[in-house]
Amino acid sequence: FARAYEPSVLRPYVRMLSVALVLTSLFDREVNCRRAASAAFQESVGRQGADSFKHGIAILTAADYFSLGNRNESFSNISLTISKFEEYQPAIIHHLSDVKLIHWDQEIRR
């Protein structure tokens, strides 16, 4: 989507999109989904501009392709790093408390 729209068109939706992509890249059960969300976030930061996606470069540095390959690393360490950014902290807390604590897969709840 980042390629298809001018930054001015996406600007009203950037916050919602960035939070959704970050949550998916951190907490999805499947490694391919985490990596795909990270790639979409990376493309968005590159094409829409780092000014539109707050802390985009720092997030991409922390949540790269290889680090997201390990679920425990993603859930435990990378999420803590990204939660320090106030734009993402409430969404991360909300997602963990409302989704992950009651997830059907016991491995995710651990």
Image: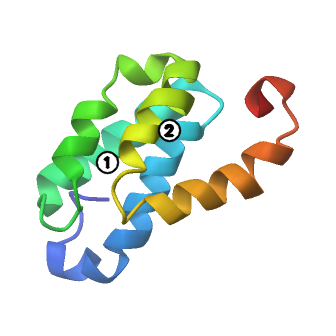
Secondary structure of the residue carrying numbered label 1 = helix
Q: Residue at x 36, y 71 (%)?
A: 15
**Residue found 54% across the figure and 29% down from its top:** 76
Nearer to us of marks 2 and 1 is 2
Residue 47 appears left or right of 93 = left
Q: Residue at x 88, y 37 (%)?
A: 104
Residue 17: x and y, percent? 41, 64
Image position, residue 1 (x, y; %) = 32, 59
Q: Which mark is residue 85?
A: none
Three-letter code for the amino acid on which mark 2 is drawn = Leu
Q: Give above or below for 59 relative to 73.
A: below
Looking at the picture, does residue 85 appear above or below residue 73? below
Write down the residue under mark 1: 41
Circle 2 is placed at which residue position?
A: 26
Q: How is the image coloured?
A: rainbow
Asked if 104 appears above or below 1 in the picture, the reply is above
